[in-house]
Image (tube, rainbow, N blue to C red):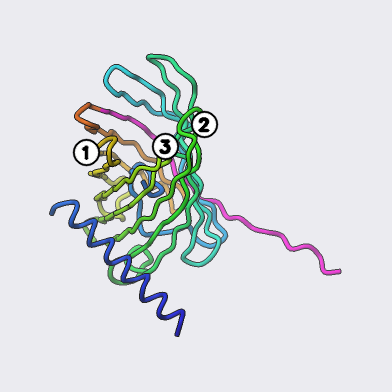
Amino acid sequence: MQKTAKATVALRTAAALAGLCAALWPGPAAAYRPFNGTDAAVADPNEMENEFQPVGTLTQGSDKSLVGPWTVVNYGFKDRWEAVLEGKGIAPLSPSGSFEITEPAFSLKHVLRPGSLQDQTGPSIATEFGVLLPEVNGDRGVGASVASIVSQRWDWGTVHLNAALSLTREHNGDVFTSVIIEGPSKWTVRPVAEVFYEREFGQEETFSGLVGLIWQVNDKLAVDAAFRHALTNGHAVTEVGAGLTFAVPIRFERGPHR
């Protein structure tokens, strides 16, 4: 009875956060390449899924930087659960500066309701929660985040809704909401797009749009490329990147019985 009550509370919480997402976006979680948001799916048990961008470019006004390596490692440690470790390298070009490792985080992601992304009916619903770790040559504080993700797949395409609340490394409140739209999953190369809104209270506000392509080479390998344009506090930000996502099985050998 206690487990059933907890599951009911979790589902109600996910539904409430999904409603918040829809309300904030008219009619940061670990990323799903090449997006800032993610999907309501996890790696298979005993499988490691790696999202990797070797290098990209970031332009903020007159400041230019290389972005990479950017890595997200997802490990499926249990049915419908995965552990996520991520971080992004930033190398300032003009003006030049120290190499930084930004946005490092560790989180857990859980599929609350298997749905269309798990070859079942209806929406897939997931939650993700974790710790924002100290940056290298950046913010040294620690933060936390919690997110809700709702995904639905149809013949014509897939939509993912994200809503997240965070306490930043500087201990400011932050809200994030995102809508991702993908072309038909049966297409080998499918167009993708994302719009997101993020506000760090007392610091900055960002409106962002992304367009790109995902080439699904096979079930375990995908290649992506995308262009993102954003306004942060009214200042233009552009980002161009390409990367890949690949999955490998992880097997633990048992030693001989003595």
N-terminal of the two: label 3 or label 1? 1
- The mark closer to the camera, 2 or 3, is 2
Q: Which residue is mark 1?
A: 207
Q: Is residue 242 magenta?
A: yes
Quarter-of-image position of residue 225: top left
When the figure is inspected, residue 243 is found, relative to residue 81, above or below; the finding is above
Chain part drawn in magenta = 237-258
When the figure is inspected, residue 244 is found, relative to residue 238, above or below; the finding is below
The amino acid marked with disc number 2 is: Val
The answer, for residue 54, to whether it is visible in the render is: no
The amino acid marked with disc number 1 is: Phe
Q: Residues within 10 Å of mark 3 (few under 14, many from 20)?
A: many
Q: Position of residue 53 (x, y in %)?
A: 44, 35
Q: Which residue is mark 3?
A: 243
Quarter of the picture holding the N terminus: bottom left
Q: Residue at x 23, y 27 (%)?
A: 236
Task: Specify the farthest residue to the right.
Answer: 258
Q: Position of residue 98 (x, y in %)?
A: 49, 20
Quarter of the picture holding the C terminus: bottom right
Q: Which residue is mark 2?
A: 136
Q: Secondary structure at mark 2?
A: loop
Q: Is residue 207 left or right of residue 48?
A: left
Q: Residue at x 27, y 65 (%)?
A: 16
Q: Is residue 10 magenta?
A: no
Q: Secondary structure at mark 3?
A: strand
